[in-house]
Image (cartoon, helix red, strand yellow):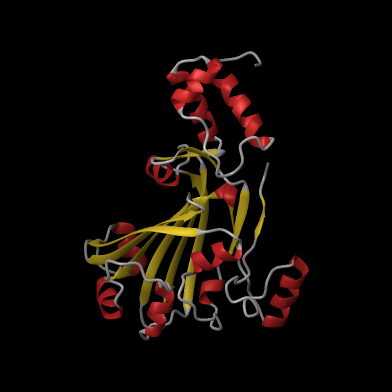
Amino acid sequence: MADGPRYQRIADLLREEIRNGTFKPGDRLPSHNELADQMQVSITTARNAIQVLVAENLLYTATSRGTIVRSREVLESVLTSPIRPDRPKTNQDIFSEIARAAGREPATQFNARMEPAGPDVALWLGVPKDSWVMARTVVQYLDNEPWSWEVSFYPRDLAEATGLDSPHDIPEGTTRRLAERGHRETAHRDTIVARPATADEAAVLGVGAGTMLLDHLRIAATGECITRVTRHRSIAARNRLAYELGDDAGSDLIRQTLGTPHPQRYSHSFGNSLVPGPP
């Protein structure tokens, strides 16, 4: 091993083994105890070496499975796909459609509750501060890897009228549910910011604090009311966000040039693809 702190030298060795394929995406690394025994170092040194690679977004820690090698692929999401008027009907939400089109297996951890609207949520929804709103939270996984964190807020009266106050996930997605109940969204305002993860976000997504995230905020409305505000946070190095705007002929030409599936020909793809990420 090269000169330097022992934990850094161990991190260098593990990093090289990940990059040369000795450890592949989804593989479990030795536990802290096992690594300490192999390298003849203390558990603290082994733990510090692992944390270096977690901070570099090469590993994540799963409570029940140990330390896992992250995928190095990038998931591209076309943000206009969920709101296409010709979007085919399926019994899965847009995240599941994107994941399966990319050959990945999606899973979610869901929570729903009524809560008082904070200042930001009240502003976004156009409701009084501290009025009750429905918060629906989903942590999304690809092949068991924590991938993104989404929280959507709905005015209480709209949630109750459309069944979004259900304590269960809605398989077809809330955008379709709203449309089916007479509240088809006709306008959206998106804001996307790249910023470091907070401690809470790092814990949920299994990354080091300070890892760059894409923070995507979407406010949606019909002609009569604000329907929802959705905040979607994902790891910047593993996600790419795109828009498709304009007529079908031009959009088809762009898709053909890029080799991107057409959303009507491939009802589960919606113009999303998986491409190689950085080494």
Quarter of the picture containing the C terminus is top right
Query: Position of 97 compared to 16: left or right?
Result: left
158 or 3, nearer to the observer: 3
Q: Residue at x 50, y 61 (%)?
A: 191
Q: Residue at x 49, y 77 (%)?
A: 90
Residue 189, x across and y down, in percent? 48, 69
Q: Residue at x 30, y 58 (%)?
A: 119
Is residue 232 depicted above or below 212 in this figure? Answer: below
Is residue 174 depicted above or below 2 in this figure? Answer: below
Task: Mark yes or no: residue 78 visible.
Answer: no
35 or 248, nearer to the observer: 35
Residue 212, x across and y down, in percent? 53, 44
Figure quadrant of residue 149: bottom left
Task: Mark yes or no: residue 17 visible.
Answer: yes
Q: Looking at the image, how many numbered discs can be counted on the residues? A: 0
Q: Residue at x 75, y 72 (%)?
A: 256
Residue 139, x across and y down, in percent? 41, 55
Residue 169, x across and y down, in percent? 35, 67
